Amino acid sequence: MGVDLNVDLCSAGAASVVVGHPLDTVKTRLQAGQGYGNTLNCILTVYRNESVAGFFKGMSFPLASIAVYSSVVFGVFSNTQRLLGQLRHGDASHAPALVDVALASTVAGFISVGIGTPVDLVKIRLQMQTQTYSTANVKLKPTVPGFPVYQGPIHCFRTVLQKEGIAGIYRGMGAMLLRDVPGYCLYFIPYTFFCGWITPDGSISPNPASIWLAGGVAGAISWGTATPMDVVKSRLQADGVYLNKYKGILDCILQSYQNEGLKVFFRGITINAVRGFPTSSAMFLGYELSLKAMKRDQTETNP
């Protein structure tokens, strides 16, 4: 049972990272970088200056950790629903009410931040390096924005830990909490609603097409609405490489608004929504396959 759960979620998670990372890089550059203008210009600039490899900067750390991250998040969500079903209805397999889904989503959101913050920090620091470390003269230009200071994910993690401590590794955690707790509510609740709505009556479980569509719509909604706080998180985590521009969440919000207006908080919203569809479809397909495997194993164990 555990093997099926991990294999399905690991495969779905890896696919979602590989498919979504190029757009994530563009989104991060738009939110935390300067001079890119619009989405198309950002894509062309990255391609001209860094080739295709530029779109995959910082991918290795999320790819290596996605199995743990997705297993924990979806496992916490599923087990919290079962616990609430047992406590409220005396049956762990009872169909969850809206409040149960919301509470389980909130718990999953809190837990996700503890794992996801360091991963996102390393990813963003590497994505914001516009040159490769090996081709740059670090001694001559160590403080130029975009100039490389990290050789790779392990070097980045070690450098941040040495210079900034645990607080540096968890930089942007508050913004990530404000993004992910409501974000996961707007992830799991729409999925549960749409999946139930488009699944034919009498079906024991949703079919793959229903899961794909419901998961994609849920992902687009969740990532689209999370964009304002995603901008703040990206800026806080990209900050600190060369100088500390922001003192915290509120200071980042105020500086960003004063310098660039309200529209700055919606940078990358289209990319977030577009990227959210296929990545979330893959994750929910893996999740539902895992649940089916668990139910099948339980049936075989207790016929």
Image (tube, helix red, strand yellow):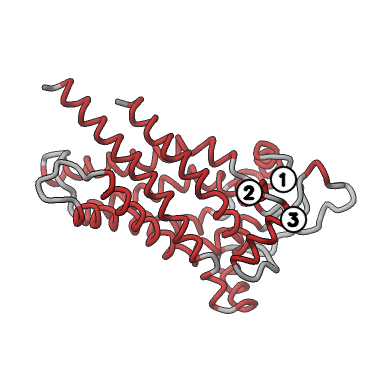
Q: Which three-letter amino acid code belongs to the residue tagged 1?
A: Lys
Residue under numbered circle 3: 49
Q: Residues within 10 Å of mark 1 (few under 14, many from 20)?
A: few
Q: Which image quarter: residue 239? A: bottom right
Q: Residue at x 63, y 50 (%)?
A: 55
Disc number at residue 213? none
The mark that comes first in sequence, 1 or 3, is: 3
Q: In screen coordinates, is 17 left or right of 128?
A: left
Callout 2–callout 1 Cβ contact below 8 Å? yes
Where does the image place residue 254, in percent across and percent down from the top left? 58, 74
Callout 1–callout 3 Cβ contact below 8 Å? no
Which residue lies most toward the right here? Answer: 140
Q: Which three-letter amino acid code belongs to the residue tagged 2?
A: Gly
Q: Quadrant of the C terminus?
A: top left
Q: Nearer the viewer, mark 1 or mark 3?
A: 3
Q: How many marks?
A: 3
Helix, strand, or loop for circle 1?
helix
Q: Quadrant of the N terminus?
A: top left
Where does the image place residue 84, in percent across and percent down from the top left? 20, 45
The mark that comes first in sequence, 2 or 3, is: 3
Q: Residue at x 55, y 59 (%)?
A: 233
Residue under numbered circle 1: 163
Callout 2–callout 3 Cβ contact below 8 Å? no
Q: Nearer the viewer, residue 105 or 62?
A: 62
Q: Which image quarter: residue 300? A: top left
Q: Residue at x 57, y 60 (%)?
A: 27
Q: Which three-letter amino acid code belongs to the residue tagged 3?
A: Asn
Whole-number angstrom distance, CA of label 2 to CA of label 1:
8 Å
Q: In screen coordinates, is 154 left or right of 279?
A: right
